[in-house]
Image: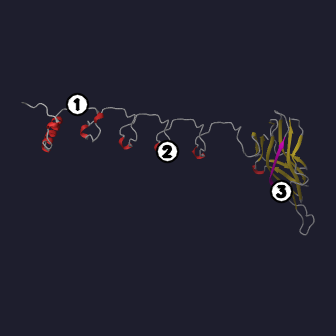
Amino acid sequence: MALTKIGTGGIKDDAVTTDKVANAINTSIATNTAKDLTALSAANLTSGTIPDARFPATLPAASAANLTAVPAANITGTLPAISAANLTSIPAANITGTLPAISATNLTNVPAANITGTLPAISGANLTNLPGGGKIIQTYVIKNTSDITNSNPSTGVYYPLETAAITVSAGTALHIFANYHYWIQGNSHIIYGTQGLQAEVGGSGSWSTIRDPGGYESYSMATVKSGGGTPGDFVNQIGDIASLNTYWTHGQSAGSTIKIRIYHNHQYCSNCIFMNFGRYGTERNIIVYEVSP
């Protein structure tokens, strides 16, 4: 009678040998190895390493959205255009090409050496710590190089140079710089006089002194004998370039006109031969700066 089922109770102790068990297991493994495994769930791969040969030479296209810590050496090809909105701490050496035009509104501490070209016209209303003297409203300049000769001049006042009418603003002042050359020659042992500036307002024809030399002569010379006393008459001469400067608060209303002139007060020279202004084309000039306080 054929045996179809053997219970464990029907097997005597030590009746099944190791060889018998090994043969049975090896036969089963060999049978299973020969099978074609398909649709195997990746969840069943819990250990071991899949050989490189099991991967195709070209991986299929897949999303890299969740990849992190990818070494830069492993990125090849050309990256697509992306936003740099969140990039920080980019070394300047890595920025090439021409930057687009952008607003400099928030730039601070820009070195002056990095500012090139012509700055646009801007308001200076909020500038502080400017050098004193106020804002220059206008500048007026007159100069002359012609030779004015007065032969046998008498004592009195002469006017080497005069400006045209200058229209001024209210509440301003005038910085005035004047220069002129004079030359006096005569048969006198004493020559002297004074110099200053005068102004006329509104074409009135009335001139007032705005730079007064005071009670002393602006120029003078004298010759005496050896041992003292007045010498006999012989030719003396004196020449110089006089500088006359003043700051004048005119106190006039807007639209008023002002003229400025140099006065030369020739006070003494008996037997003078001539008095010359601008000899040999030496320039005389008046420069006027109108400034706000």
Place of residue 7 in the rendered image (x, y in percent of width and height, measured from the top left): 16, 34
Q: Nearer the viewer, residue 260 or 161?
A: 260
Tell whether 14 sits left or right of 206: left
Q: Which residue is mark 2?
A: 92
Foreground mark, 2 or 3, reads 2
Quadrant in the picture for residue 37: top left
**Mark 2 or mark 1: whose residue is earlier in sequence:** 1
Tell whether 109 sits left or right of 255: left
Tag 2: residue type?
Answer: Ala
Disc 1 + disc 3, Cβ < 8 Å: no
What residue is at 68 percent from the left and 36 percent from the top? 123
Q: CA distance from mark 2 to mark 1?
A: 56 Å
Foreground mark, 1 or 3, reads 1
View extreme (bottom): residue: 227
Q: Which residue is mark 3?
A: 238
Q: Which mark is residue 38?
A: 1
* Mark 3 Cα shell of 10 Å, populated few (<14), some (14-19), many (≥20): some
Q: Is residue 81 magenta?
A: no
* Mark 1 Cα shell of 10 Å, populated few (<14), some (14-19), many (≥20): few
Number of numbered tags placed on the structure image:
3
Q: Nearer the viewer, residue 275 or 86?
A: 86
Q: Which residues are magenta?
A: 236-249
Disc 2 + disc 3, Cβ < 8 Å: no
Q: Which mark is residue 12?
A: none
Q: Nearer the viewer, residue 50 or 9?
A: 9
Query: Dot 2: what SS?
Result: helix
Q: CA distance from mark 1 to mark 3?
A: 126 Å
Foreground mark, 2 or 1, reads 1
Quadrant in which the N terminus is drawn? top left
What residue is at 83 percent from the left and 56 percent from the top? 238
